[in-house]
Image (cartoon, rainbow, N blue to C red):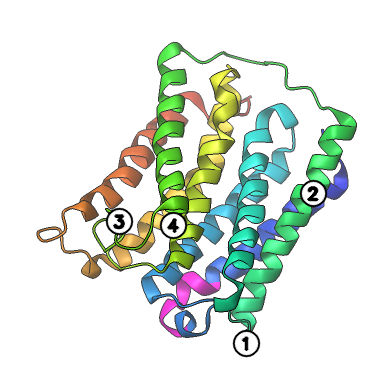
């Protein structure tokens, strides 16, 4: 497995994301005007949902800390931190760092990127084994993982390349018009999730997929909760695309609950 330094940096990411996410999720109206760039309260609580989800993912990954089980969660976390820092750099002229919450977001991403740097160096030095252990996935389970990768990857790539005014950017799905800054941040989030599961094209480990699903489950829970809290922003009659925003998270989250009950969360039940 990777070094203890990598592990403790991952725990540190969990702590920082938990603090940041709790503040953004609980006080979106107050913190939206002073965040790192121009966002609405709903965007703020959604970003808070990402952060709380990242906190859970980083914590459960650091706790289990077995490379062949948790490596895709680490890949997601590393890509997310580096990607969001790149977005901040690209839009640095619109970056606002006057308020402590903005600095907390910035510092959290720096620690995340540091964890990625140390983690990659550890991987290149130690070359931990990724040999299959436990039950292998079925063809249907493998196809579902690939379908998730393609769909979420499309959303991420679209968020990274679309321009304001393109399909879905004018409150057609997300109920508010995003700036390019916000759209690119959303794109990094989805694209990182998609790239993290690419190894499952050839990795047949059911335990690894179950861990990734369980680690990412917090993202589904908190982002969906944020949407329900601000459900008044959705006009399903005039903008039915909003149903897709809810539907995707529910269509993934609800079945996963039954998957965990039947197969577990990626570790032995003994």
In which quadrant of the rendered image does the N terminus lie? top right
Task: State the residue in front, 205 or 32.
Answer: 32
Characterize the local packing of mark 4: few (<14), some (14-19) or many (20 or more) Cα atoms within 10 angstroms: many
Q: Give the Cα distance between marks 1 and 2.
A: 28 Å
* Dot 1 or dot 4, earlier in sequence: 1
Mark 4 vs 2, N-terminal side: 2
Nearest-to-viewer mark from 4 and 2 = 2
**Residue of label 1:** 98
Residue at the spot x=16%, y=64% of the render?
235
Residue denoted by label 2? 117
Q: In the rendered image, is residue 265 in sight?
A: no
Q: Are marks 4 and 2 in contact (CB under 8 Å)?
A: no
**CA–CA distance between discs 1 and 3?**
32 Å
User: Residue 74: x percent and y percent?
Assistant: 67, 42
For the point 54% across and 59% down, the residue is 52
The answer to whether marks 1 and 4 mark residues whose Cβ atoms lie closer than 8 Å is no
Q: Nearer the viewer, mark 1 or mark 4?
A: 1
Callout 4: SS: helix
Name the N-terminal-most of marks 3 and 4.
3
Spot occupied by residue 191 in the image (x, y as percentages of width and height): 51, 44
How far separated are the C-alphas under marks 4 and 2? 28 Å
Q: Which residues are magenta?
A: 23-30
Residue sitting at the far bottom = 98
Please give the residue where the numbered disc 3 appears in the rendered image.
166
In three-dimensional space, the C-alpha distance between marks 3 and 4, rounded to whole angstroms, equals 27 Å
Q: Which of labels 3 and 4 is toward the front?
A: 3
The numbered disc on residue 222 is: 4
Q: Is residue 67 visible?
A: yes
Q: CA distance from mark 3 to mark 2?
A: 35 Å
Query: Quick one: SS at disc 3?
Result: loop
Is residue 24 inside the magenta stretch? yes
Q: Marks 1 and 4, how far apart in space?
A: 27 Å
């Amino acid at each position: 497995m990777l070094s203890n330094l990598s592990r403790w940096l991952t725990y540190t990411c969990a702590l920082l994301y938990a603090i940041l996410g709790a503040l953004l999720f609980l006080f979106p109206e107050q913190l939206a005007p002073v965040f790192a760039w121009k966002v609405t309260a709903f965007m703020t609580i959604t970003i808070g949902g990402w952060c709380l989800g990242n906190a859970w993912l980083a914590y459960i990954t650091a706790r289990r800390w077995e490379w062949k089980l948790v490596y895709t969660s680490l890949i997601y976390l590393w890509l997310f931190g580096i990607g969001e820092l790149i977005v901040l750099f690209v839009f640095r002229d619109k970056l606002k760092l006057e308020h402590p919450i903005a600095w907390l977001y910035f510092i959290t991403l720096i620690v995340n990127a540091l964890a990625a740097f140390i983690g990659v160096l550890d991987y290149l030095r130690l070359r931990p084994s990724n040999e299959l252990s436990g039950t292998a996935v079925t063809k249907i389970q493998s196809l579902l993982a690939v379908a998730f990768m393609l769909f979420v990857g499309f959303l991420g790539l679209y968020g990274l390349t679309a321009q304001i005014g393109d399909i879905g950017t004018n409150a057609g799905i997300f109920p508010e018009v995003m700036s390019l800054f916000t759209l690119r941040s959303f794109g990094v989030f989805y694209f990182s999730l998609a790239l993290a599961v690419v190894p499952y094209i050839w990795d047949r480990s059911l335990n690894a997929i179950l861990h990734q699903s369980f680690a990412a489950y917090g993202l589904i829970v908190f982002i969906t909760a944020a949407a329900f809290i601000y459900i008044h922003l959705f006009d399903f009659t005039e903008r039915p695309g909003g149903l897709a925003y809810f539907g995707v998270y529910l269509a993934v989250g609800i079945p996963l609950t039954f998957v965990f009950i039947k197969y577990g969360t990626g570790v032995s039940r003994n």
